[in-house]
């Protein structure tokens, strides 16, 4: 199922923080196969990478959303676990 013009407009608003510059750019993306392809096209854009470089780097680190498992350390020392718990607590309590 291809994406709608409304989904494309909202992608511009949410991911680039602006309105699409023309009806032509909407028409160019209407042929995309699905929402994932649409979102990836915005995340891969130079404009997005310049506006949100930290997020763009994190997105790249996630191996381009291909679904491959990410390595996660599950065997940690008590000190590492305590540090992680403190960091999570600080993030959630402000």
Image (cartoon, rainbow, N blue to C red):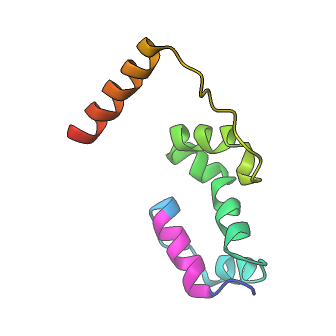
In the rendered image, residue 16, in percent from the top left (x then y), is placed at 51, 60
Q: Residue 25's spot in the image, x, y percent?
A: 67, 76
| Magenta run includes residue 47 | no
**Position in image of residue 44 (x %, y %):** 69, 53
Quarter of the rendering containing residue 21: bottom right
Residue ID at (46%, 16%):
80
Q: Nearer the viewer, residue 41 or 46?
A: 41
Q: Give the main secondary structure of the magenta stretch.
A: helix
Task: Classify 42 as above or below 69.
Answer: below
40 in relation to 63, above or below: below
- Residue at 59% in and 39% down: 58
- For residue 9: magenta? yes
Query: How many badges with numbers are in the image?
Result: 0
Q: Nearer the viewer, residue 72 or 10?
A: 72
Task: Work out whether 16 lies above or below 24.
Answer: above
Per the rendered image, the range of residues in magenta is: 5-14
Location of residue 20 in the rendering, given as x and y in whole percent from the top left corner: 55, 73
Q: Who's the residue at 65% across and 80% down the image?
A: 26
User: Camera-side residue: 67 or 47?
Assistant: 67
- List the single residue furthest toward the left: 94
Q: In the displayed structure, does residue 78 sit left or right of residue 69?
A: left
Q: Nearer the viewer, residue 8 or 66?
A: 66
* Quadrant of the drawing holding the N terminus: bottom right
Q: Check the picture and name the quadrant holding the C terminus.
A: top left
Residue 19 drawn above or below residue 1: above
Which residue is pictured at 64% across the width and 87% down the height?
4
């Amino acid at each position: 199922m291809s994406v709608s013009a409304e989904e494309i407009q909202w992608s511009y608003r949410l991911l680039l923080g602006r309105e699409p510059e023309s009806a032509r750019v909407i028409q160019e993306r209407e042929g995309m196969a699905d929402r994932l392809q649409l979102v990836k096209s915005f995340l891969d854009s130079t404009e997005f990478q310049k506006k949100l470089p930290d997020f763009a780097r994190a997105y790249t680190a996630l191996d381009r959303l291909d679904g491959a498992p990410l390595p996660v350390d599950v065997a940690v020392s008590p000190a590492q676990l305590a540090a992680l718990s403190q960091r999570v607590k600080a993030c959630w309590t402000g």
